[in-house]
Amino acid sequence: TYEMPDYAEIIASATYGVTDAYFVNGRVGYAPEIHDGSRTVIETTDVSLTTDYYFDSFATSATYGSVDDEGDGWEYWSLGFSTYLGDLSTFSLAYVDSSIDDSTILVTYAIDFSL
């Protein structure tokens, strides 16, 4: 079984509001040392672009990203939507895929417990 290693990552992101309802977010992550499971230390860079569009009662989202780990790499993407079910809960559904793994459907129900 594969255990995800502990590592430090530097992340920079920026969001731009194209309109009151449409947003674009760019993200760059850099991890100088990740142990790859075979005692090899690799350097990894992750770059992604996400767009969100908000309607009255729901939002849509699309993400595309690319990871480079010293010559090897992969791509990932997702499409999804979310909606509020009340003041404190949210439901979301997303299709998530990558060039190295099978696609999946991610269903999330979230409750906000803020005081």
Image (cartoon, rainbow, N blue to C red):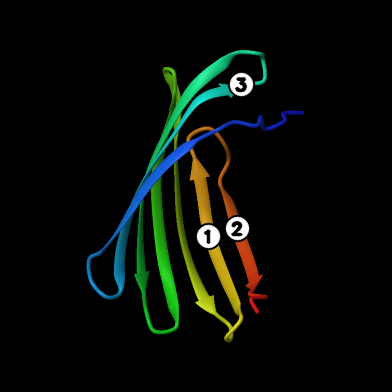
Q: How many marks?
A: 3
Q: Residue 54 falls in which quadrant of the image? A: bottom left
Query: 36 or 75, which lies in front?
Result: 36
Query: 99 or 84, which lies in front?
Result: 84
**Can you give x and y, in whole percent of width and height, for residue 55 in the image?**
37, 79
Q: Residue at x 44, y 83 (%)?
A: 57
Of the numbered discs 3 and 1, the one sitting upstream in the chain is 3
C-alpha span from label 3 to label 2: 26 Å
Q: Residue 60 falls in which quadrant of the image? A: bottom left
Residue type, numbered disc 1 = Ala
Q: Residue at x 57, y 36 (%)?
A: 101
Left or right: 17 in relation to 31? left
Q: Residue 2 falls in which quadrant of the image? A: top right
The disc label shown at residue 86, or none = none
Quarter of the picture containing the C terminus is bottom right
**Element under disc 3:** loop
Q: Which residue is mark 2?
A: 106
Q: Find out whether the residues at labels 1 and 2 contact each other: C-beta distance under 8 Å.
A: yes
Check disc 3: other Cα within 10 Å, few if <14, some if 14-19, many if 20+: some
Q: Which residue is mark 3?
A: 36
Q: Residue furthest front?
A: 115
Residue type, numbered disc 2 = Leu
Q: Residue at x 61, y 21 (%)?
A: 36
C-alpha span from label 3 to label 1: 28 Å
Q: Which residue is mark 1?
A: 94
Residue type, numbered disc 3 = Asp
Query: Where 95 sits versus 68, above or below?
Result: below
